[in-house]
Image (cartoon, rainbow, N blue to C red):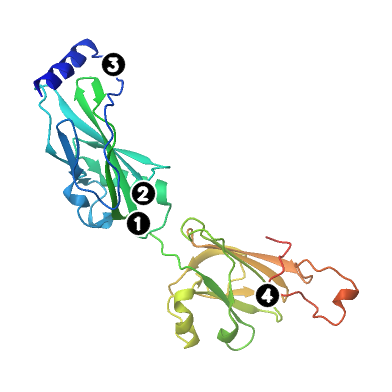
Amino acid sequence: MKKLIYILSLLFIGFTSCNEDFNEGISPQSNPQEGAQSFEGLTLKLGSNFNNALSLANFAVTDTLKAIEATASPELNAKSKIEYTLEISKTADFAKVAEMDAGTGSQLKVADLNTAFRTIFGNSPAQKDVYVRCKAYIVEGTSRIQYGDYFNFGSTKVTPIPLDVTIDEAYSLVKNAGSSWDVANMTVFNHSSENVYDDPIFTLTFQTTANNTMIKFVPKSLLSQVQNNVWTGVVGAKTDGTTDLTGDLTTSNSGSIVIATAQWVKVTLNMMTSKYTVELLGQISPYLWTPGAHQVGRQRHPPSCIQPIWT
């Protein structure tokens, strides 16, 4: 140990302006969360805030977390200290990482961890398995020397600070072309394979067959409720009966959007910004439909699975 301290002292004296890494070992890696990790007298484990599933909603964004705890430390001179950077990833190989400053171990900012979580996992509000590792540095003045290689802690569970908006996994169009809402024939909006918080855009191209057709949008979680004529939470316009082609969406006493003239229509919903857009496409079907003898006797319009020209 005295030899180690002597070597470190020489490094600080001779290379006070140097910032190169000091790499002499690799900590073992495994999953899930591992116990203490050691290198040359320094033994680390995840801090107490990571011992159980960590929900960032339980903290203020200005709070700091106990991220790393040293259960054993090498002897250092009075002017030296050990600081850490923390890295998180969604995979055990750390193919993509987000890095944060953890100070001396208990100065990891909640805001920084939440930002790092969003960088790795996107806007999903769901709890995720997060792989965690850190690098340790011996710091004296402006000198900063990495001590060992990565200390790997396996995985732990983290839930980010929730967004201000809740997005359902799917939405359906419901129409009222007369005196009642046709809840028996709702049509599901199209959506990509991405998480709805990373791609909040839903689109649907459809035909109205009567003037002044009213439309609203039903979250998947409320389908059975609406079929029982309970409309609380249904998405619609802020102004009932509006014919505006763009506007704000609401779930509080939502109103209908009116398609004044029977025609083909494309509706786009942005559920992150709570905005809608209506495109009036006219009387000609927007679907690709090849004429020819092979179509004789078939329906006038193609099945809904045919890709529309407007996307």
Q: Which residue is at a point 48% across and 80% down the rendered structure image?
A: 223
- Packing grade of label 3 (10 A; few <14, some 14-19, many >=20) is few
Alpha carbon distance from label 1 to label 2: 9 Å
- Packing grade of label 4 (10 A; few <14, some 14-19, many >=20) is some
Residue beneath disc 4 = 260
Residue beneath disc 2 = 117
Residue beneath disc 1 = 128
Alpha carbon distance from label 1 to label 3: 39 Å
Residue 281, numbered circle? none
Residue beneath disc 3 = 18
| Residue 100 found in image quarter | top left
Alpha carbon distance from label 4 to label 1: 46 Å
Alpha carbon distance from label 2 to label 3: 32 Å
Residue 139: x percent and y percent? 20, 24
Which marked residue is nearer to the observer: mark 1 or mark 2?
1
| Residue 124 found in image quarter | bottom left
- Packing grade of label 1 (10 A; few <14, some 14-19, many >=20) is some
Residue 161: x percent and y percent? 32, 55
Q: Nearer the viewer, residue 288 or 89?
A: 89
Q: Earlier in the sequence, mark 2 or mark 4?
A: 2
Q: Which residue is at a point 33% across and 59% down the rendered structure image?
A: 127
What amino acid type is highlighted by mark number 4?
Ala
Alpha carbon distance from label 2 to label 4: 46 Å
Q: Is residue 222 above or below residue 84?
A: below
